[in-house]
Amino acid sequence: MSLIPPTNEGPPPSPASAPPARVHLPEAELASTPLDRAQMLAEVMDYVIKVSKPTPLVLPRPRVWIPLLTLASFIFALYSWAVKPAWIWGPQVDPDVVAATHDPDMRFAMFLLAQQILKYREEFGVVPATLSQVGARMDSVKYVPLTDTSFSLRYESDHPIIYYSTGSTDEFLRNALDVVRSSTPSKTP
């Protein structure tokens, strides 16, 4: 017993058609020989191989100057940081020398300013109300008139320096004059 129902297959197929008859070209065979056809086929195959050859990938010329310039810049920066030449970083000063000479230099500058104020007092009988009346200006020094004839100068820093017009000039100057003389460049003829 078959579970598949019978199907109607339709009409039987028609007989196969016969292959078309070969067209015979006697003139073509007479016009070329098998050797001519083989040469022509070889030429066509050579052309196909020549045209279908993979072309090499042409990359752009590498820019060698970019890595060289980067390397040169890095070496220059490393040199500059390690050596710290004066033409780049400015003159190098020893912080110990600066600290040792700054206090005496400031004391001497304040002494010279005080001399201008004392000269004003001799001329007018009183100290000036401001430093602009003397024609002097030091931004880092504060001028305070104490009385009509006395004043103080104050330099604010880690170690403030105070000059009192009533105090001893030698005590105030300490070794400032010697330090200023030793740091002054000597003149050679």
Image (tube, grey):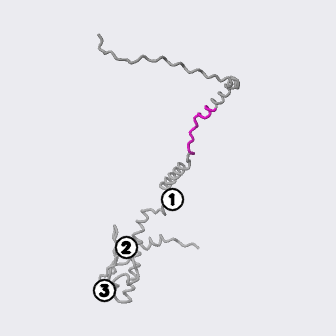
x and y percent of residue 57 in the render?
Answer: 56, 39
Q: Is mark 1 on a helix, strand or loop?
A: loop
**Measured Cα–Cα span from mark 3 to mark 2:** 23 Å
Q: Residue at x 38, y 84 (%)?
A: 133
Q: What residue type is labelled 3?
A: Asp
Closer to the eye: label 3 or 1: 1
Between label 3 and label 2, give the one nearer the viewer.
Answer: 2
Question: Which residue in the structure is indicated by mark 3?
Answer: 148
The residue identified by callout 1 is 85
Where is the C terminus found, in terms of image quarters?
A: bottom right
Q: Quadrant of residue 155?
A: bottom left
Which amino acid does the dot numbered 2 rest on?
Answer: Ser
In this view, the residue in front, 134 or 98, is 134
Where disc 3 sits, the SS reads loop
- Residue 19 in the image: x percent, y percent? 54, 20
Residue carrying label 2: 140
Residue 129 pos. (x, y %): 33, 84
Residue sitting at x 33%, y 15%: 6
Q: Which residue lies furthest to the bottom in this view?
A: 124
C-alpha separation, residue under disc 3 versus residue under disc 1 = 53 Å
Confirm whether the magenta stretch covers residue 174.
no
Label 1: few (<14), some (14–19) or many (≥20) C-alpha neighbours in 10 Å: few
Q: In this view, does 88 lie above or below 57?
A: below
Assign the magenta stretch its main secondary structure.
loop
Residues shaded magenta = 47-61
